[in-house]
Image (cartoon, grey):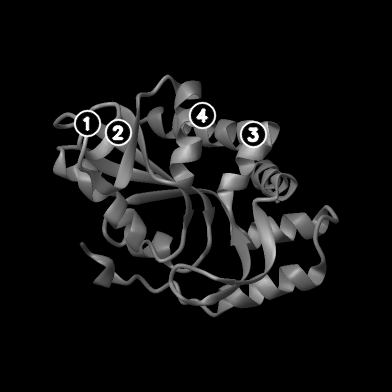
Amino acid sequence: MSIVTDKIADALYLSGCLKFGTFKIKSGTVSPYYIDLARVLAAPKQLDIIAEVAAEKIRQITASEPIDKLASIELKGALIAPSIAVKLDLPCVIVRKEEKSYGVTGRTAGADITQGNRVLFFDDVISEGLSKIEGIKPLVALGASVKHMLVVVNREHGGKENLESLGYQIHALAKITDIVTSLVEHGHISKENASNVLDYVKNFKTTPNTNILP
């Protein structure tokens, strides 16, 4: 198991972000685990670890391809994105789920988006990928170029493959199957919990689905 995977697995476990049980997720299916990344706000050390690992991944990307701004969408991705942006000295943009109708209106907050801005989109997890397409729409409408997307956890529901089939470059700090394997190896969770997750992931096909086109 890689050092990065171990760091992310430990951070999610120690902060209480990774929960096991029976959870209904956004797609309507029932999952044996749930990732509540908002919980990391209660664990500053683990938040810093996740932010630093994410920042290092972005440094690797920008070594060959410049990025002008870091963007995320409310709620969970937006809670962590500023911590990453500070480490990289990158302006940060938050996409609202709904347009604000008073004060400073619009779908974005934070840094302004200008024509041609190269924006990296960050979020907590990726499942099928549809929410990422919806999340970047306001950025693209303002003239941004979004080529790279980064998530903390790939839930391995085919989202990475779906989006890559559309030309996006998808980066994940860790896959859920590797995370539970790491946690078992370090004695943090039971083999039963890990097996439930591994069996659950096997039920999802990773055949690219272009029906998620906007």
| Residue found farthest to the top | 89
The residue beneath circle 2 is: 109
Q: Earlier in the sequence, mark 2 or mark 1?
A: 1
Q: Earlier in the sequence, mark 4 or mark 3?
A: 3
In 3D space, how far apart are the residues under numbered discs 1 and 3 (Cα atoms)? 33 Å
The residue beneath circle 4 is: 83
**Image quadrant of residue 71?**
top left
Name the kind of residue labelled 1 in the image: Val
Kindly check if marks 4 and 3 are in contact, taking CB atoms under 8 A apart as contact.
no
In 3D space, how far apart are the residues under numbered discs 2 and 3 (Cα atoms)? 25 Å
Name the kind of residue labelled 2 in the image: Ala
Nearest-to-viewer mark from 2 and 1: 1
Kindly check if marks 2 and 1 are in contact, taking CB atoms under 8 A apart as contact.
yes
The residue beneath circle 1 is: 104
SS category of the residue bearing label 1: loop
Kindly check if marks 1 and 3 are in contact, taking CB atoms under 8 A apart as contact.
no
Q: Which mark is residue 49?
A: 3
Q: Earlier in the sequence, mark 2 or mark 3?
A: 3
Q: Is residue 177 left or right of residue 133?
A: right
